[in-house]
Image (cartoon, rainbow, N blue to C red):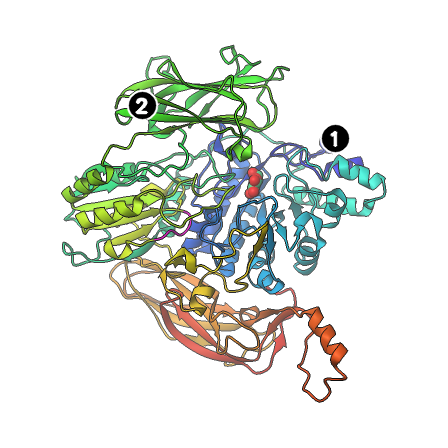
C-alpha cells in the first residue's frame, strides 16, 4: 500500500514519483507549452531551451503539419532536460480577450484548438515523451484562479470547452491530462468523478495519467474517487502518505489505489522510464531548430491590413526598393518580447529584438535606420537583460556585452562568503524552487554579478521585489536595500514576493556600471529576488518619434503588451494597448502615411487607429524566431502565413463574456453559452475590427464552388466537400480554406450559432497554380449536444394525465450528440466574414450520433 500510494504523489517540485528499488528512477517533468524549460522555475535557471511561438501564434498558423513538427522538436528538447513529461499543450479557449493566459492557448474555436493541439501531442509523443494536456477544464480566466467557479452548462461544455480535450484524446492519443485549479459547476475537478472519471475516461476511453495542476488537489477520499491519479508537486495535502493512511483506514479501497498507481506506472513505462536513467540538463540549439522556429514565426504572422499609400501604388508591404530609410519606433521595438509570463516562461536559446533584426536586414540593403521608443508601457519594472547586461570580465579582462551574469551560491546567510556552487543567469531575477546545493542549517545566500550598460542619460528607477531579503548595488553603491526589511506581500512570486523597494540612480549613456544582487534566504521553500529597471524615457517621446517618422521613408511602429501585462496569475483589465501607444500610433501615422504597425501581443487589443495606418501585422509572442521572421516578412523574404485564430472585437464591450468576466462573488458564469467567439459576433451581426480567420498574405486566392459527396447526411456516413483553390496572384503563397456548417434555421430545435467551423485546410501554391482541396465532415460536424432537463421530464410525467387534451411534446430523455433534421449550409470562406461558395445538404430525419466518435 505504501509503495502504491507513493506513486500517487510527486517526488519534487518538478519530479514525478519513482521506485528506484524496482528500477523506476525519479524523473523530472518540464513546462510547457512554448518550450521545454527544464526544472528551473520560470526560465530563471541555467537551462536554455528552444522557444517556439506561443499558443495563439500556433493557432494562427492553422497548420497541424507544422505544429506536429514543432511538437517533435519539443519532444527532443524535453529529452535534453531529461524529462519524460512535457506539461503542455494548453487547450483552454479564448473566451474573453482579457484572459491572462490567452497567449498560451490556441484559439477561441474548439475545433481549431483541438486539431492544433492533437498535432502538437502527436509530435511530442512520437519522441517518447508524454504530454499532459491542460487545464481540464473551464480554466478560461486567471482572476481568483484557485477558487473561482466556472459555471458552464452541459451543452456548452460538450460543444466548446471539452472538445479540444476530446480531440487530443481521440486524435492525438495523449497519455496525460492535467486538471485545472478552478471549480466547475461548484466542485473542484479533484472532488467530482463526473468529468475525469465519467467523461474523460468512461466516454472517451482515456487510459493515461491524470495529474493535478500544482497544489490543485484538495481532498484525499474525494480525490481518489475523481479519476485523478497523481498529485503535483511534492508536499500536497491529498495523495501519497495521506492516501496510504486512507486506504489503511478503509476510507479508500485498495483496488482504487491500485488503479491509480497502475496508471502512473503504465504511463511512465510507455515513456520508457524504466529503461534509462535521468541525466543532467543540456542544451541543444541546433541550426535546424533555429530555422524551424523562424519559419514557424513567419507562418504565424498575420497581415491584418495592407494598403497602398500616396507614395506607393502597391500595398505598402513588403517594402519596395524605393525605401532608403526606416524609423523603427515603439516600446516593443528594442525589446525581445517573445513569450508571455508565468510558468510558460523559459530561458530561450537567444533573444533578438525587432530593432536588431530590422536593423541587420536594413544594413544589408543599405537602408538607414533610426529608433525612438516613443512611450513607456511597463507595468512593473522589467528585469535587466539582453545586450544591456554582461557577466564579469573574463581572465583576459574582456567584458562580453550581452553575456550572462554570474550566479554564486553561498552556504549560510553571508552572501560575501565563498561560493559552493555557481551558474549563470540572463536576467536580474533569481528564483529558487528546490533549495540550492547547500544544507547549511542557517539557510543559503546568493550573489549575482556582472555589469549594466546605461542606454540613455538620466535618472533610472530600480524596483526590487524579494521573497526574503535582497540587496541591489550598482556602480559600487547600494540602490535598493531589503536586508533588514520585512515588507507586506504583493502579487509577485505567485503571491510570496514583497511590495517593491524603490531606488533611483543617475546614469550616463554608454557607461558600464558594476551590478550586484545579493540575497539571503533562511527559508528552504520557494524563494527569490528580482531587480527591475525603468529606463528614463526622454521628454517629448512622441514628438521625437514623429520627427523620426517624418524624416524616414517608412515608419515601423512596434507596439504591444509584455509578459507582465499578459501572464499566468492575473487577467488584463482593459483591451487598450497599455500606456499612450494609441496616441503614439495616431501621431506617427499623421507624420508618415507609410506607417506599418506591428502588434506584439498574445491576445486582442483595441485598434482604434487601424484605418489611419498603411499596414498592420500581428506577430504575437512569436518565440525566438519572431524578430527575424518579422524582418523576413517586412522585406518580402517570407510571406505572413497566419490567419486570426480569434476575433478582434471592435470594442471589449462587444465580446461575449462582457458582463460575466471575470466573475462575481467567486462565480464565473459562461452566460453566452455556446455563442463564444465568432459564433457570438456573427449571430448578433456585431461589427468587429478583424474577424476570426482573417489574414491577407502577399498573394490572392480564389476558392471555387464546393462539391459535396451527397445531398443528405446519413447516420454513420461522412460527407466530403471538394473545391478548387487557385493562387490568383503573382507570388507563391499559402491560404487557409475554412469550412463552416450553417443550420438553415438556427433557432430550431434549439438556438444555434449561425455557423461553426467544422473543417479547414492550408494550401501552398505557386502563382497561377490550382489544387483541389477535399475536406471531411463527419456526423459530429452537424450535431449539437442534447441535454434533457430532468425537471422537465418529471413535470411532463406528473401532469401527463391532465395534459391529455393537449399535445405532449416529444421528449428525448437521453443526453447525447444529436443531428437535428433540417437543411444545413456548407460554407467555404477565406475568413468567418469573407465567404466564398456554399452548398446545401439536408438531414431527412433527426438521428443520434453513435457515441465515441470525435
Ligand atoms: C500552471 C501549470 C504549470 C504548473 C507547473 C501552474 O501554476 O497553471 O500550467 O504546468 O504551474 O509549473
Residue 389: in magenta span: no
Q: Position of residue 767 (x, y in %)?
A: 28, 62
Closest to the observer, 426 or 794: 794
Q: Position of residue 21 (x, y in %)?
A: 74, 30
In the visual, does 11 lie left or right of 321?
right
Is any atom of residue 402 visible in this view? no
**Residue that label 2 marks:** 453
Identified at 64% across, 55% down, the residue is: 185
Instruction: Work out which quarter of the rendered image holds the C terminus and state it.
Output: bottom right
Q: Disc count in the image? A: 2
Mark in front: 1 vs 2: 2
Cα distance, mark 1 to mark 2? Answer: 53 Å
**Residue that label 1 marks:** 21
Instruction: Work out which quarter of the rendered image holds the N terminus and state it.
Output: top right
Q: Position of residue 86 (x, y in %)?
A: 56, 42
Is 471 rendered above or below residue 792? Answer: above
Is 250 rendered above or below residue 840? Answer: above
Q: Quadrant of residue 313?
A: bottom left
The dominant secondary structure in magenta is loop
* Label 1 element class: helix
Q: Quadrant of ligand 1?
A: top right
Amino acid at each position: 500500500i505504501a509503495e502504491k500510494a507513493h506513486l500517487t504523489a510527486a517526488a519534487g517540485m518538478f519530479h514525478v514519483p519513482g521506485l528506484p528499488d524496482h528500477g523506476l528512477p525519479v524523473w523530472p517533468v518540464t513546462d510547457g507549452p512554448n518550450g521545454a524549460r527544464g526544472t528551473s522555475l520560470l526560465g530563471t535557471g541555467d537551462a536554455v531551451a528552444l522557444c517556439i511561438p506561443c499558443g495563439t501564434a500556433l493557432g494562427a498558423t492553422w497548420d497541424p503539419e507544422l505544429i506536429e513538427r514543432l511538437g517533435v522538436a519539443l519532444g527532443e528538447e524535453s529529452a535534453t532536460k531529461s524529462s519524460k513529461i512535457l506539461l503542455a499543450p494548453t487547450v483552454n479557449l479564448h473566451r474573453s480577450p482579457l484572459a491572462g493566459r490567452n497567449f498560451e492557448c490556441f484559439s477561441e474555436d474548439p475545433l481549431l484548438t483541438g486539431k492544433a493541439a492533437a498535432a502538437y501531442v502527436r509530435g511530442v509523443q512520437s519522441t517518447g515523451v508524454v504530454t499532459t494536456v491542460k487545464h481540464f477544464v473551464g480554466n478560461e480566466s486567471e482572476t481568483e484562479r484557485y477558487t473561482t467557479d466556472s459555471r458552464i452548462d452541459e451543452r456548452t461544455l460538450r460543444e466548446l470547452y471539452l472538445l479540444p480535450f476530446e480531440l487530443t484524446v481521440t486524435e492525438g492519443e495523449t497519455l496525460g491530462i492535467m486538471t485545472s485549479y478552478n471549480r466547475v459547476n461548484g466542485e473542484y475537478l479533484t472532488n467530482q468523478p463526473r468529468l475525469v472519471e465519467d467523461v474523460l475516461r468512461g466516454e472517451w476511453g482515456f487510459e493515461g495519467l491524470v495529474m493535478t495542476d500544482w497544489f490543485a488537489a484538495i481532498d484525499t477520499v474525494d480525490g481518489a474517487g475523481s479519476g485523478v491519479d497523481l498529485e503535483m508537486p511534492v508536499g500536497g495535502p491529498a495523495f501519497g502518505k495521506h492516501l496510504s493512511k486512507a486506504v489503511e483506514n478503509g476510507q479508500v479501497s485498495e483496488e482504487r489505489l491500485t488503479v491509480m498507481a497502475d496508471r502512473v506506472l503504465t504511463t511512465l513505462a510507455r515513456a520508457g522510464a524504466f529503461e534509462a536513467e535521468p541525466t543532467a540538463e543540456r542544451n541543444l540549439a541546433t541550426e535546424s531548430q533555429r530555422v524551424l522556429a523562424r519559419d514557424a514565426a513567419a507562418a504565424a504572422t498575420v497581415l491584418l491590413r495592407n494598403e497602398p499609400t500616396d507614395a506607393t501604388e502597391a500595398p505598402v508591404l513588403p517594402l519596395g526598393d524605393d525605401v532608403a530609410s526606416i524609423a523603427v519606433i515603439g516600446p516593443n521595438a528594442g525589446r525581445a518580447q517573445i513569450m508571455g509570463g508565468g510558468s510558460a516562461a523559459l530561458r530561450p536559446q537567444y533573444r533578438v529584438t525587432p530593432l536588431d533584426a530590422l536593423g541587420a536586414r536594413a544594413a544589408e540593403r543599405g537602408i538607414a535606420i533610426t529608433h525612438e521608443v516613443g512611450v513607456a508601457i511597463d507595468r512593473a519594472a522589467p528585469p535587466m537583460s539582453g545586450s544591456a547586461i554582461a557577466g564579469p570580465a573574463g581572465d583576459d579582462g574582456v567584458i562580453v556585452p550581452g553575456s550572462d551574469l554570474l550566479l554564486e551560491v553561498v552556504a549560510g546567510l553571508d552572501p560575501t562568503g565563498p561560493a559552493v556552487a555557481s551558474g549563470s543567469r540572463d536576467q536580474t531575477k533569481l528564483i529558487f524552487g528546490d533549495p540550492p546545493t547547500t544544507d547549511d542549517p542557517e539557510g543559503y545566500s546568493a550573489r549575482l554579478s556582472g555589469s549594466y550598460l546605461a542606454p540613455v542619460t538620466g535618472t533610472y528607477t530600480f524596483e526590487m521585489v524579494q521573497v526574503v531579503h535582497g540587496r541591489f548595488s550598482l556602480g559600487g553603491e547600494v540602490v535598493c536595500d531589503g536586508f533588514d526589511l520585512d515588507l507586506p506581500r504583493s502579487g509577485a512570486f505567485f503571491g510570496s514576493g514583497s511590495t517593491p523597494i524603490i531606488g533611483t540612480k543617475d546614469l550616463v549613456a554608454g557607461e558600464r556600471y558594476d551590478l550586484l544582487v545579493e540575497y539571503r534566504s533562511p527559508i528552504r521553500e520557494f524563494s527569490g529576488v528580482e531587480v527591475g529597471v525603468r529606463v528614463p524615457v526622454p521628454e517629448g517621446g512622441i514628438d521625437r518619434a514623429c520627427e523620426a517618422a517624418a524624416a524616414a521613408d517608412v515608419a515601423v511602429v512596434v507596439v504591444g503588451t509584455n509578459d507582465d501585462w499578459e501572464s499566468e496569475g492575473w487577467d488584463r483589465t482593459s483591451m487598450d494597448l497599455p500606456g499612450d501607444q494609441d496616441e503614439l500610433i495616431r501621431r506617427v501615422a499623421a507624420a508618415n502615411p507609410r506607417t506599418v504597425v506591428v502588434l506584439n501581443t498574445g491576445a486582442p487589443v483595441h485598434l482604434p487607429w487601424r484605418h489611419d495606418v498603411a499596414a498592420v501585422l500581428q506577430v504575437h509572442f512569436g518565440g525566438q524566431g519572431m524578430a527575424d521572421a518579422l524582418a523576413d516578412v517586412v522585406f518580402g523574404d517570407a510571406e505572413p502565413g497566419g490567419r486570426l485564430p480569434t476575433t478582434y472585437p471592435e470594442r471589449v464591450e462587444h465580446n461575449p463574456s462582457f458582463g460575466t468576466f471575470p466573475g462575481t462573488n467567486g462565480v464565473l458564469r459562461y452566460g453566452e453559452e455556446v455563442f463564444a467567439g465568432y459564433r457570438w459576433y456573427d449571430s448578433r451581426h456585431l461589427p468587429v475590427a478583424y474577424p476570426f480567420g482573417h489574414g491577407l498574405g502577399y498573394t490572392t486566392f480564389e476558392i471555387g464552388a464546393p462539391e459535396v459527396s451527397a445531398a443528405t447526411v446519413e447516420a454513420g456516413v461522412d460527407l466530403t466537400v471538394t473545391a478548387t483553390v487557385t493562387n490568383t496572384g503573382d507570388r507563391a503563397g499559402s491560404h487557409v480554406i475554412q469550412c463552416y456548417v450553417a443550420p438553415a434555421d438556427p433557432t430550431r430545435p434549439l438556438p444555434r450559432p449561425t455557423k461553426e467551423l467544422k473543417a479547414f485546410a492550408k494550401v501552398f501554391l505557386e502563382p497561377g497554380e490550382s489544387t483541389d482541396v477535399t475536406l471531411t465532415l463527419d456526423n459530429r460536424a452537424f450535431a449539437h449536444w442534447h441535454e434533457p432537463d430532468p425537471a422537465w421530464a418529471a413535470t411532463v410525467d406528473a401532469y401527463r394525465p391532465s395534459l391529455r387534451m393537449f399535445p405532449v411534446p416529444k421528449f428525448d430523455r437521453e443526453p447525447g450528440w444529436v443531428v437535428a433534421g433540417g437543411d444545413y449550409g456548407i460554407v467555404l470562406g477565406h475568413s468567418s466574414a469573407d465567404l466564398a461558395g456554399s452548398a446545401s445538404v439536408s438531414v431527412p430525419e433527426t438521428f443520434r450520433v453513435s457515441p465515441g466518435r470525435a
